[in-house]
Amino acid sequence: MSSVYHWADGLLLTIRQRGPGLYDLRSGEQHNLDGRFLDTYRDLSLGRSVDEESEAVAHLIGHQWIEPGPGRIDGLWRQKLTFVDDLYYRSYAASLSPREHDVRELLVDVHARRKRFLSTAGQCTVLPETALRRSLRVGFAEAAGKKRILCIGDDDLTSVALAALGHEVCVLDVDDYLLELLSSFAAEHNLAIAGHAVDLCQPVDRLGLGRFDVFLTDPSSNAECFALFLSRALALLAPGGVGFVAVNPPAKRLFHDMTAQWELPVHAWHSAHNRYYSYLGKLHPYLSDWVEVRPSTQTRLGLSADAAYTPHDLYSDACPPRGPLGLLHLDQIDNLKYAAPSYLRTLVEVLARQQSESLTGLDTVAQEQWSLVLAWLESGFIALHADRAKAQLAACYYPHEVKTSQEAMRLLISAHKQHAAKANLVTNWGDQDLRVR
Amino acid sequence: MLGLAPGATWVRWPSVIAVAGPGQEPRLIDVRWYDQLVELTNGLPPADSREELREALGPYAIEQATPEVDPVLLAAGQAKDRDHLGWLPDFLSPADETLILLEDLWARRRLWHSRDGAQPTLPGSSWYRHRAIVAGKAERVLLVEDPDGLSLALAKSHHVTVYEPEPGHRLWLQEQSRRLGVATSIEWIDQLGAARQSDIAVLNATDFEPTAAALAQAIVATRPGGHILVSCRSPADLWLYAMAQQAHLDLDDCRREVDHLVLPTGHVPRGAADLVLFRRGPQARLDPRSAQDPRGVASLPYLTLDFQSLAAERLTADDRDRWLDWLAALCGTEVAGRGHHAHGDEDMLWWYDQTGAGLLANVRPESADALVLLMPYSRRLEQAALCATFWLLADEHTGVRPRRTHVFSDQGIMS
């Protein structure tokens, strides 16, 4: 029997490389789902009719992960989103008009309606307040003139804000769930948004070249994705049109070189303009700049509008963060005599052996109050700094890998810290920092 | 008439002066030139040793007086403001006279001092702080350090008390206050304990202990019902809120990532500080000696600087050696050891001084990046490493991976 169901409040579906997962905002737990039922999960994300007797639905009902009724704003998700969004929104909210506040509320609503995230397509979503600021760069239709706006990909849902400002918006995206969400939300709120399921790797000449006044896009920051997304966007842009592109700061040089080669003038560059969140209901560490380009008659495209493209690695980052560090700080260490260089050297040799690494070099600095031992390995280094005056020992191993780091920590702690009052572990961008007092 | 070339600035370090400007190689000159450089910067011809000074300055010396408002610096400051504060919808719209004043001050400032406490910020960030203070309807303001000249903008409409520990910078601020006709609205104090009661105190969260001391005194110097505005940069967010709670301060507001630090090199390392506003209730007080750090992370044993998109053509072995030379010169301490270890495409550099402060740098010329580990952490060395890198190894595309705050109030906010 078919009935309408939706995911329960506080549950968010993510489609990851390793399969679908359900994240529970209430408990912080993640549940792996059966990868055979992606269509059912999509229907539930939209609050559509599903077969109650099917294996997938029965399982979800059993866990109380879905509830009867059509899709709606997830109250708990909205509350979490408002909290993280406010972290930035408060910085300028006082300067906004009531209508701008209303647009922001609408954005929070549509973001809170969204129940599925497609990590496999490089989706990383900006905060509603960022979508609002992006749209305000285009302006209200009454002031800036009604624009025909193209969103090349719109998992950020910026189209909702642009349409709410009075513009006519066209969204091209590969995510059919997102397009259906936008379509139903636009219908409910009388917004001029037209969505098209388009694979940008296919020719875009049939979409009507040169018909948009403005484009917005947030591609993965690598040469391939920049070239594909911008080529398509520029082909569809009318003469005198304006484009906005998100650029990850480490890829600034790459983007600059590409625009120089294409003779694509950069009109304005706004650092750290775009702030993102994760489906965990927290800020995402990623941020990006917002770059305004204004093509001239000399501007060339990297890829012709009528040409197909075979992608290699569209969604990887051209400037991946480097390997994480393992850091350890021991305060009030035992037996200061063992913090002398000779002993520390032995220790790093043991550490290297433990990690099946051969030493490629060893440097030591021995001073009256402190010592430093640097062990150079095939894959990185180990550094030990002992401050005998302060009875402290600091260690760094690079790159950090969980298993080898744990072994290293165990060895250092057993050698220098028999009794501890307190230990704190901090992780930041993959770096692991353990402090023991 | 001898003057300083357009766009050039100079920075006083403990035992050396660094001079830099657009299109020229930065250079180090002897600190004995300090007084003559102050005169030259103020448009006064140096009394003696003119030729020697010209030689020391090299291409930074010009045959005309240093302009009061440097158009090159002004344009650069305005561009940086637009770039970094432009995400705020109301920034520059309409043009604001406070922002114009602060950008004008920026363009008059040729002399910088390396400092351990509060660091300078962009004129646009000072404008933002000014706006936050004005919105609070304060009449009397206490600034615990004033690296930017915010006091000069506030003094147009407020009575300002300033504790500015850097004597050379304080002299410059006092001179500017006379020029702007606001000297009578500013009271300069030598010790924070001497501050009269204000409606709002503004301070920076630096290290745990100095922040606790400054916060304790700011509470005493702020009337009940007044506010304390703290610029908070990672990792101070890990302990600031707990410290404020111990002091019985109420969290009123937080403006995230608006306070953009600017280096004496003129570069803006990515990752801005938050402005956190606390209300000072009648029960507020803090004994700095008993301030607790519940997360156990108040000490900063090490810090990493992750430089991205360095200038590939400036990463030769000679450049890297020169970088180590500059670290030593800027820190002004005796070197205990330095070296490098090449491994495949990577180069490991290390440098330590006699005090035990030092760093390791993993430089990858191929991908034009460098990971610098300061272990143990030293604020002075952090400044030196940032400045030396931006002066010697960087170009307009270079950045540092942002240090963003992870905590708001008592909650972790970053995935």
Image (tube, coloured by chain):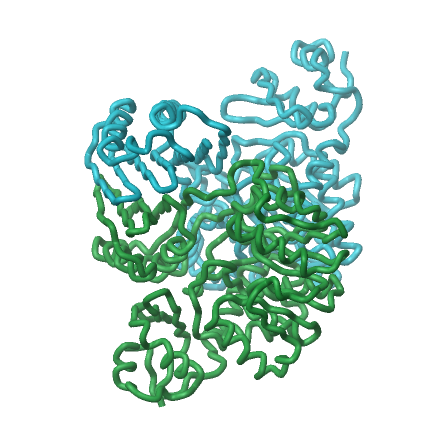
Chain colours: A cyan, B green
Q: Quadrant of residue B3?
A: bottom left
- In the displayed structure, A196 sits above or below A410; it is below
Residue B281 point in image, percent of width and height? 75, 51
In the image as oriented, which residue stretches furthest toward the bottom?
B1
* Residue A287 visible here: yes
Residue depicted at x 68% and y 64%? B131
Residue depicted at x 62% and y 51%? B256
- In the displayed structure, A227 sits above or below A74; it is below
Residue B62 point in image, percent of width and height? 34, 84
Q: Quadrant of residue A378?
A: top left
Residue B17 point in image, percent of width and height? 34, 69
B313 sits left or right of B215 in the view: left
- Towards the viewer: A98 or B281: B281
A188 sits left or right of A59 in the view: right
- Towards the viewer: B232 or B58: B232
- Towards the viewer: A262 or B389: B389
Q: Quadrant of the N terminus of chain B?
A: bottom left
Residue B78 point in image, percent of width and height? 53, 69
Residue depicted at x 50% and y 25%? A17
* Residue A258 visible here: no
Q: Quadrant of residue A379?
A: top left
Give the number of marks: 0
Q: Quadrant of the C terminus of chain B?
A: top right
- Towards the viewer: B337 or A378: B337
A316 sits left or right of A182 in the view: left
A195 sits left or right of A35 in the view: right
